[in-house]
Amino acid sequence: APLYPHILPTQQVDVSLEDANKQVMWPLFFLYEEHQQSDFLRQCGEDSTLSDHLSSVMDPSLAPPPWDPERTLSPSSVSLYFISYQTPVKRDGKWLWLQDEAERVLPKKWVQVKATCTVRELVRLEGHIIAQFPVLHV
């Protein structure tokens, strides 16, 4: 069963414009399905890289998360993916993922993204449909 619906943020999350640098700030959602865990970053500058954000959530100077005490995940050891033409939809007040291929216009596929990709590049990738925030599978 998919992990998504019960771990998606429930509060309203918006893309915003940072006045100081005139930079669009995006929320990012990193999903560690193997561990059934996630990291949600509320504001990530469009010029920052995915590696920048992985380094902040996997900072070796901080205690490891309880679900990865051996630090099996690190910015240099993980691969990032999004599912093309996949987006959560809100039905009856709940976030759901379209599991039925008949409901889709285009077929989904896993697309690998380099950690050097900027947030701006990420949101512009072909097939990356963003309903509210980018979801990256780690």
Image (cartoon, rainbow, N blue to C red):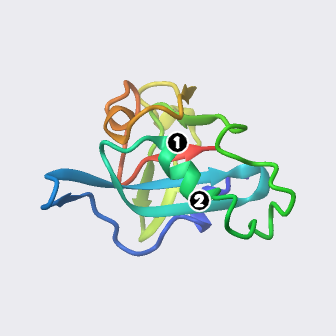
The structure residue drawn at horizontal position 51% and vertical position 57%, both measured from the top left corner, is 96
> 32 above or below 103?
below
> 61 above or below 89?
below
The structure residue drawn at horizontal position 14% and vertical position 60%, both measured from the top left corner, is 20
Contact, mark 1 vs mark 2 (Cβ under 8 Å): no
Q: Secondary structure at mark 2?
A: helix
Give how far apart the Cα atoms at labels 1 and 2 are: 10 Å
> 93 above or below 138?
below
Q: Quadrant of residue 58?
A: bottom right
Q: Position of residue 122 (x, y in %)?
A: 39, 35
Q: Give the camera-side residue of 84 and 56.
A: 56
Judged left or right of residue 91, residue 13 is left
The structure residue drawn at horizontal position 50% and vertical position 55%, both measured from the top left corner, is 29
Which amino acid type is marked by label 2?
Val
Residue furthest out toward the front:
61
Compare marks 1 and 2 and give the one earlier in the sequence. 1
Which amino acid type is marked by label 1?
Ser
> 101 above or below 56?
above
Residue furthest out toward the bottom:
11
Q: Position of residue 112 (x, y in %)?
A: 57, 27
For the C terminus, the image quarter is top right
Q: Give the camera-side residue of 9 and 49.
A: 49
The circle drawn on residue 57 is 2
The structure residue drawn at horizontal position 44% and vertical position 25%, both measured from the top left corner, is 106
Q: Secondary structure at mark 1?
A: helix
Q: Which residue is mark 1?
A: 51
Q: Position of residue 119 (x, y in %)?
A: 37, 41
Judged left or right of residue 100, residue 13 is left
